Each structure stands twice: as C-alpha cells, then as structure tokens.
Amino acid sequence: MASVPASRKPSRKLRLHIFGSKLHKWLALVVGVQVLLWMGTGAIMSFLKIEQVRSEHVISREAETLDPEFPAPQWLVDRQGIVAVTTKSVAGRPLVQVERSDGSMTLHETETGTRVSPLPLADAQAIASRAWTGPETSITGAKLIERPIGTEFRGPFPAWQITFSDPDATRLYIDASSGAILAARSDTWRFFDFVWGLHIMDWTQRDRINSWWLLLFGIGGTVIALSGFVLLANRFPKLRRRKVR
C-alpha cells in the first residue's frame, strides 16, 4: 500500500489553525446568543414606558387620609389631610412625626407638640454618626441642601448633606423634615453612575432607559447579531455541503 506523501499531511501549524478556527466559531455562537439576548431585551425595555411597567397609569398610590375625629395628641389642632401620626426615635430621642396628604412631614415633641423640624445641624450629625457602621471615621462637612445636586441627589428638600472623612468620601443625605436617611453616596457611587449612564446611553439624567438612542442602537445591535448568525451558519462545512447537494 502506498504511503501518503509527507507533503499532503497537514502540518502542525495548519492543524492548530483549523482547531483555532473551529473554537472561534463555537465561541462566537455561544457569546453571540447572549449578545443577541442583551440587544433584543434592551430594545424591548427601551420601547416600554416605565410608567406602564409599574402600572402607574392605572393604579393610584396616594395615601388615604385619616378621619379628622381620630384619636390624636391634644396639641395636634389641625387634623385635616393627615395620613399618619407616628412616634419614632430621632437622634436618640422620641418625637412625633405628622405626615400629610401633600407629602409634607413635621416632627414634634411628644408632650408639648413643639415643632422641631427642620432638624438642626446637631441632630443631623447625630443621626449620621448613629448610622455609620464602617471603620472609625469623622464628619468633615455638613450643609443644608435645597436644590438637586446633579444626578447624586434630587430630593426631597430640605435635606442635610453630611460628609465623612473615609477614603470613599461617603456623603449621607438626611431629610431635614423627618430625620430619615434618604441616600448614601460616595466616589464609588459616582463611578458606577457614570458607567450606568454609558450603559443606558443617558449621559445627563442617568435614569432614562427608554431613550431613542438606546432603542435605535438596541435594534441595530439585534439586526447585526441576527445577520452575524446567518453568516456564521453559511460558514459551517456541513451546511455548505448540503447547499451544494
């Protein structure tokens, strides 16, 4: 039996090239499926209105007001539009929080009803210190905020901004009307917010997931992925042989 000429045997370099080509095609197929899903779902989410997703167009979330005759502290004279009267701990002392249907909240002394909101700086710093659970640090700055700060904080107002001296420059936003912690921000959050803006293609507000830019690029990416699958299928040897037959 005649032996196969050495010149006809595939070289080691050629075998590696063939193996690499096959591996590349299968990896492209696997990764391409996920890219197609990402593009397709991104386009769908961009098309849907977030208000409809949350059913805000058919469901009212307005709080129900209490009957003016409900039992309440004697010092609470104006009972119109009240949705909740709550006793809570603020900076280590008990206070009564009165919430009304217009969204306003006020804090009062439990016995006398004396209004203590907006909270003073000392209370805001005490709330921030009690909330801190990280390594030992100190407060380096505090100011009362009455307007949005870029994408970092958009209300409600007024609010106290308390800045810590930790390496991440953590900033705590505290509602001056209720003493509630509204948001915690840091340099890491700012970096994430920037990356998120790039991801959803909203470079200013960072919360619009249904912009025309994202929708167009999502549709374009889906078309590119689908056409890539068609081109990839045409390159498979078995499919080419069937086509020839």
Image (cartoon, rainbow, N blue to C red):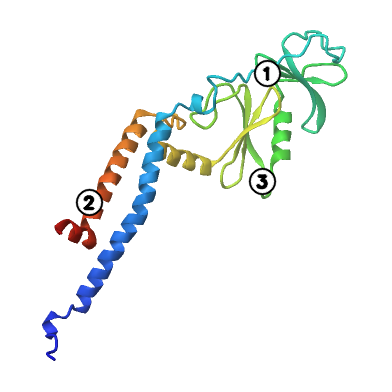
Q: Is residue 236 visible?
A: no
Quadrant placement of the C terminus: bottom left
Quadrant placement of the N terminus: bottom left
Residue drawn at 70 percent across, 20 percent down: 118
Mark 3–mark 2 Cα distance, whole angstroms, equals 59 Å
Residue drawn at 25 percent across, 54 percent down: 233
Tell me which corner region of the image, top left, top right, bottom left or bottom right, holds residue 43: top left
Q: Pointers 2 and 1 in contact (CB under 8 A)?
A: no
Front in this rendered view, residue 71 or 77? 71
Tell me which label, 1 or 3, sits earlier in the chain.
1
Front in this rendered view, residue 119 or 58? 58
Q: What amino acid does circle 2 point to?
A: Leu
Mark 1–mark 3 Cα distance, whole angstroms, equals 39 Å
Front in this rendered view, residue 179 or 24? 24
Q: Callout 2: helix, strand or loop? A: helix
Left or right, residue 7 beside residue 98: left
Kindly report which numbered mark, 2 or 1, lies closer to the viewer in this rendering: 2
Left or right, residue 148 beside residue 65: left
Q: Callout 1: helix, strand or loop? A: loop
Q: Can you identify the residue that label 1 sits on? A: 63
Q: Is residue 169 visible?
A: yes
Mark 2–mark 1 Cα distance, whole angstroms, equals 57 Å
Q: What amino acid does circle 3 point to?
A: Thr
Q: Callout 3: helix, strand or loop? A: loop
Give above or below for 144 relative to 115.
below
Residue 14 at what x, y percent from top left? 20, 73
Left or right, residue 171 beside residue 98: left
For residue 231, the mark is 2
Give above or below for 106 relative to 53.
above
Residue 71 at what x, y percent from top left? 86, 14
